[in-house]
Amino acid sequence: MGYRSDVVLACAFPTPKKLLQYIAKQRMLPKVGSIDVWKDHLKDDMKIHTVLNKAVEGYTVAMFEAHHWKWDEYYEDVKAIQKFFKSASDHGGAWIEIQVGEDNATSTESDCNSAYYEGEDEDVSQLVLEYLQDNFYTTCEIQSPMRENKLKNVNDFITEVKL
């Protein structure tokens, strides 16, 4: 059967409109091998969270959870999902990936591109990354306070927030 993991990948942007623009761009990218990541995995399974905390109001997070997957970067679907989320740092967002293996071993990676907002008063991408790092963490499983809030399906989000 092989080693299996629970995984959360999330990307965040400072506004709902920036996330929607990012999703629109990512949906236009070519397939990774035979995988159309949007149609095959994200269209129905990606969830959206808009932050209501006054300090970071407007931050919008797209999140994908996979449970009991063979999560290995050599699989085309894993590569495609990782590419979708990890490209956020090239577009003014930030991303985080957390894995918990069946032996409870954990792995966390995250990144942003500070140069994207160069010349602005604050490093927005770093603030967004810090928000993700503060809100996704592991115990013996992946935890996020966002699960306690009502998450929107990505299709509802796209309908609600127009470009």
Image (cartoon, grey):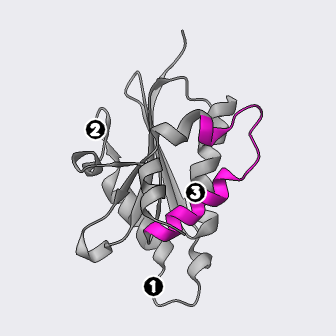
Identity, as a three-letter code, of the amino acid under mark 2 = Thr
What numbered label is drawn on residue 122? 1
* Dot placed on the residue nearer the N-terminal end, 1 or 2: 1
Residue 65 visible here: yes
| Quarter of the image with the C terminus in it | bottom right
Give the x, y percent position of residue 96: 48, 52
User: Up-down: is 3 above or below 39?
Assistant: above
Give the x, y percent position of residue 70: 55, 23
**In the image, what residue occupies the spot 61% across and 29% down?**
72
What numbered label is drawn on residue 139? 2
Q: Name the front one of labels 2 and 3.
A: 3
At numbered mark 1, what does the secondary structure look like: helix, strand or loop? loop
Near mark 2 (Cα within 10 A), the count class, few <14, some 14-19 or many ≥20, is: few
In magenta stretch: residue 34:
yes
Horizontally, residue 30 falls left or right of residue 142, namely right
At numbered mark 3, what does the secondary structure look like: helix, strand or loop? helix
- Name the residue carrying label 3: 23
Instruction: Give the distance between the C-alpha atoms of the residues marked 3 and 1, in whole angstroms.
Output: 24 Å
* Dot placed on the residue nearer the N-terminal end, 3 or 1: 3
Find residue 129 and report its image quarter.
Answer: bottom left
Near mark 1 (Cα within 10 A), the count class, few <14, some 14-19 or many ≥20, is: few
Image: magenta residue range: 16-39
User: Up-down: is 160 above or below 83?
Assistant: below
Horizontally, residue 29 falls left or right of residue 45, namely right
